[in-house]
Image (cartoon, rainbow, N blue to C red):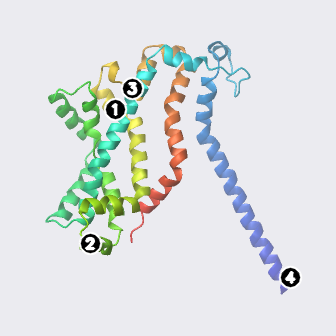
């Protein structure tokens, strides 16, 4: 009996080990597939222009890395201006959006007013409208206001989000009603309850929303390209496309890759720093009660 039990135990451990090994092998393979484009981008950015053009078969490493491509990316094209425009657009848009969605989510989650659920359902219905229709409406509005080729024209259509209101409202709704009742008995205003109780409790979700909005703004392409044709207001996404179209990006591929590395580093660093907060915020948003 003891021998049979030992054999069954060894067999179960062997199966678990085999499954774990296969899982790790597949995950490693998938990670390499995902990370390889970034490695190739970084490798190309440190290859000399002559070295890159002399390669008949692309080399997977270089013994003579150089930073001259990064110098060219900033000196030969207005990459610094594109970068600064994107920082201003991202910071202002994200800040204004938080000012809009936090009170809206609080109102839908905690305040009692006639037609609240109906209004919230109508808000959710807006998510069913194709983005193309929204872009057309926004373009007509911004053009009618004379805000093309301006930061207000870039920023205003992005200062709210139904999805983020919904996500934050679901988190606010998880906070027990007893806390709100006790706060009102103590004479706490709604604004103070929101800022001192609800927002600290839901900090992981708020940080997640901020990071997602930053990524969305940083990668924004269609709207900025549609509403701006003045290079003075180009963001990095439109700037990179402009660099490629004007011949510089097609001729000097290493410098083009250097520019892409420069605009990718902030988002990668942001995610690596706050990845735990992002995971906690997303998981919290899917839990009720």
Residue 219 in view here:
no
Judge from the rendering whether residue 56 lies leftward or rightward of residue 253; answer left or right.
right
Which tag, 3 or 2, sits closer to the chain's start? 2
Q: Residue at x 41, y 20 (%)?
A: 242
Nearest to the observer: residue 239 or residue 86: 86
Q: In which quadrant of the rendered view does residue 72 lie?
A: top right
In the rendered structure, which disc, 2 or 4, sits on the residue that comes first in sequence? 4
The residue tagged with tag 2: helix, strand or loop?
loop
Q: Which residue is mark 1?
A: 222
User: Element at badge 1?
Assistant: helix
Label annotation for residue 186: 2
Q: Position of residue 14 (x, y in %)?
A: 77, 67
Check disc 3 and report its element: helix, strand or loop. helix
Residue 35 shown left or right of residue 136 in the figure: right
Q: Secondary structure at mark 4?
A: helix
N-terminal label among 3 and 4? 4
Q: Looking at the image, is mark 1 or mark 3 earlier in the sequence?
A: 1
Can you identify the residue that label 4 sits on?
3
Whole-number angstrom distance, CA of label 2 to CA of label 1: 49 Å
């Amino acid at each position: 009996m003891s021998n049979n039990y030992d054999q069954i135990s060894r067999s179960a451990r062997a199966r678990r080990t085999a499954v774990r090994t296969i899982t790790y092998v597949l995950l490693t393979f998938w990670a390499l597939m995902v990370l390889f484009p970034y490695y190739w981008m970084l490798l190309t950015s440190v290859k000399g222009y002559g070295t890159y053009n002399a390669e008949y078969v692309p080399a997977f490493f270089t013994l003579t890395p150089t930073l001259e491509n990064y110098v060219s990316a900033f000196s030969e094209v207005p990459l610094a201006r594109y970068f600064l425009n994107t920082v201003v657009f991202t910071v202002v848009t994200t800040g204004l959006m938080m000012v809009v969605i936090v009170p809206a989510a609080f109102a839908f989650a905690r305040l009692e007013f006639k037609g609240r659920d109906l209004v919230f359902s109508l808000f959710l219905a807006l998510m069913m409208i194709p983005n193309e229709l929204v872009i057309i409406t926004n373009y007509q509005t911004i053009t009618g206001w004379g805000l093309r080729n301006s930061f207000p024209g870039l920023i205003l259509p992005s200062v709210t989000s139904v999805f983020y209101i919904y996500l934050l409202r679901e988190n606010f709704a998880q906070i027990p009603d007893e806390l709100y009742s006790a706060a009102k008995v103590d004479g706490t205003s709604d604004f103070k309850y929101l800022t001192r109780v609800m927002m600290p409790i839901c900090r992981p979700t708020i940080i997640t929303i901020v990071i997602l909005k930053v990524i969305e703004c940083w990668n924004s392409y269609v709207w900025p390209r549609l509403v701006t044709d003045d290079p003075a207001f180009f963001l990095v996404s439109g700037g990179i496309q402009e660099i490629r179209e004007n011949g510089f990006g097609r001729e000097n591929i290493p410098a083009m890759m250097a520019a892409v590395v420069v605009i990718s580093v902030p988002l990668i660093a942001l995610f690596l720093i706050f990845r735990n907060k992002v995971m906690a915020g997303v998981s919290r948003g899917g839990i009720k009660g």
